[in-house]
Image: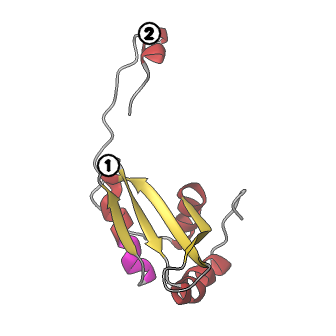
Amino acid sequence: MGLSDVIKKCFPNVVPVLRPLVTDQEIKDPYWLAGFTSGNGSFYIDINKDKKKLGEIARLIFKIYQHSKDEKLMRSLVNFFSCGRYIPRSTKDFGEFIIQKFSDINGKVIPFFDKYKIVGIKF
């Protein structure tokens, strides 16, 4: 999004550099994906009212979000995990890769992170 006006005033000689467009956006290294998830991903539990019964329903969700310029990368996660979907957020400049099906999280995502550990606070 660039520098704020306050920072621009403090550093008037800074020349903006355009970020290069990366067209080869696919997951080549599972350790990279583990690190990327550490920064931009999460597991969480979503609790909603159950429309068919009294009470509530809980769902485990795995999500990674990223700026919309990296949409190809985010869509490649669907192929990498062989599940999930990419949801572009039209009112914002980002999209989400999301897996909601418990069997996919339990059978694909959790075994992936058992093998390729996240390092850091999200471990």
Q: Which mark is residue 91?
A: 1
Local crowd size for mark 1, using a 10 Å CA cut-off: few (<14), some (14–19), many (≥20): few
Residue placed under numbered mark 2 in the picture: 9
Q: Are marks 1 and 2 in contact (CB under 8 Å)?
A: no
Q: Is residue 80 magenta?
A: yes
Q: Is residue 37 left or right of residue 121?
A: left
Q: Is residue 91 left or right of residue 101?
A: left
Instruction: Find the magenta span and give its range.
Output: 76-81
**Could you say which quadrant of the image residue 24 lies in?**
bottom left
What amino acid is found at the position of numbered circle 2 in the picture? Lys
Q: Which mark is residue 42?
A: none
What amino acid is found at the position of numbered circle 1 in the picture? Thr
Which residue does the image show at 41% across and 72% down from the upper left? Answer: 77
Q: Position of residue 39 (x, y in %)?
A: 57, 55
Viewer-side label of 1, 2: 1
Secondary structure at badge 2 equals helix
Which residue does the image show at 65% across and 80% down from the upper left? Answer: 115
Q: Give the mark nearest the N terminus, 1 or 2.
A: 2
Quarter placement of the N terminus: top left
Of residue 79 and residue 52, the one placed in the foreground of this image is: 52
Q: Is residue 101 above or below residue 36?
A: below
Residue 25 visible in the snapshot: no
Of residue 12 and residue 51, the one placed in the foreground of this image is: 51
